[in-house]
Amino acid sequence: MEQQLGWERRNSRPNVLSHPFTNLQAYEHKHMKQRYATSLVLVTSCLSAMAQPTLGAGAVTPIPGEQVTFVVSEYSAPGSGGPSQIWDFASLPSVGTNTVSYVSLAQTGLGGTFPNATVAQDETGGDYIFFRGSATGFEEDGFAVGGFTGTCSDRLTYVSYPLNYNNNFTDNSTCSVTDGTTTWARTSSITGNADGWGTVVLPWGSVSNVLRVHFLKNMVDNQYNPASVYDNDTYGWYKPGVHAPILSVDRTTVSIFGFSFADSSATYADASAIGLEEAARHDIGVD
């Protein structure tokens, strides 16, 4: 589900998911439903404004009522990790947009099924992806999409708090998925490594004091034999207090019924998203 990952790809939907950590699940949601100017960087200014960021409790966890517009683009190499980096993505083309909305658990009418969730991503048409935010992380709690419902006995952490440069985390989850008739297991694993920090340059401007996190995610869905396997390699750039990735670049490999295919893309937040426009009007990226 693209999560199903701010950071499903509907009409060029991005990961991310929405929250890029969710790009991988987007494929599974889609599989279920179908069943099958350019900015100039003033280097000295950017370097002087840099400060190593920390993702503290709730730093990138979405909250009910937020709405984020992402620009969908072509894949671009993530570049090098390390401290005080300047990642230049100013020439990324726009091939579409996707707006992601977050609602309260009460608004979904599914609080009885997902009592531990704190926010839901509205997939429209009565479809939702559920998350839980806490002082220790941002986690996937389950989904109700396209007639399929998944509840997780062990939630999957998308971002662990606090997260600093050179920190890493791992997590695993087991979920029970049903179409109302049949029930099967879905298992997932994730590793996250905060491998760099600095300034990211986008087509609309630059944002400093961002932390880059490299995610490797594997998901195995056991509805059929052989099982469907999804592998996702994503780099996400996060600014503390902005509840979505500023940018994500993603490669996904999928194996279904013995056939494999791959896809890659990039998505970045529109300048109007959750405070970015205000940040861009000032000393771009200042905390």
Image (spheres, rainbow, N blue to C red):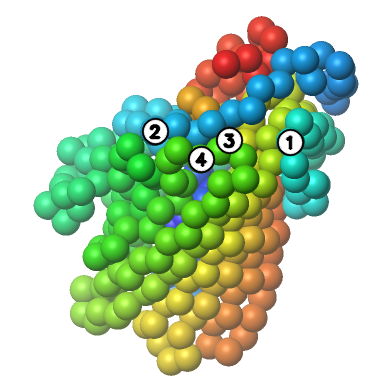
Q: CA distance from mark 2 to mark 1?
A: 22 Å
Asked if 16 appears above or below 287 in the picture, the reply is: below
Select label 2 or label 1 by which is in front: 1
Q: CA distance from mark 3 to mark 4?
A: 11 Å
Between disc 1 and disc 3, the foreground one is 1
Q: What percent of the width, then of the height, locates residue 182?
A: 24, 81
The furthest residue to the top: 282
Q: Quadrant of residue 44?
A: top right
Note whether 8 is above or below 218 in the view shown.
above
Type of the residue with mark 4: Leu
Q: Position of residue 66 (x, y in %)?
A: 40, 28
Please say if the residues under marks 2 and 3 sit with CB atoms less than 8 Å apart.
no
Q: Residue at left 37%, top 82%?
A: 223
SS class, disc 3: strand
Which element type, helix, strand or loop, lies under badge 1? strand
Q: Of discs 3 and 4, which sits in the foreground? A: 4
Whether residue 139 is visible:
yes
Q: Which mark is residue 163?
A: 4
* Amino acid type at mark 1: Pro
Q: Looking at this rendering, what residue extends furthest in the left direction?
A: 112
Residue indicated by mark 3: 238
Q: CA distance from mark 1 to mark 3?
A: 14 Å
The residue tagged 2 is 57
| Residue 55 locus on image (x, y percent) | 50, 34
What residue is shown with label 1?
83
> Is 186 placed left or right of 239 in the picture?
left
Q: Earlier in the sequence, mark 3 or mark 4?
A: 4
Q: Is residue 89 left or right of residue 283?
A: right
Q: Nearer the viewer, residue 26 or 147?
A: 26
Q: Amino acid at mark 3?
A: Tyr
Classify mark 4: helix, strand or loop.
loop
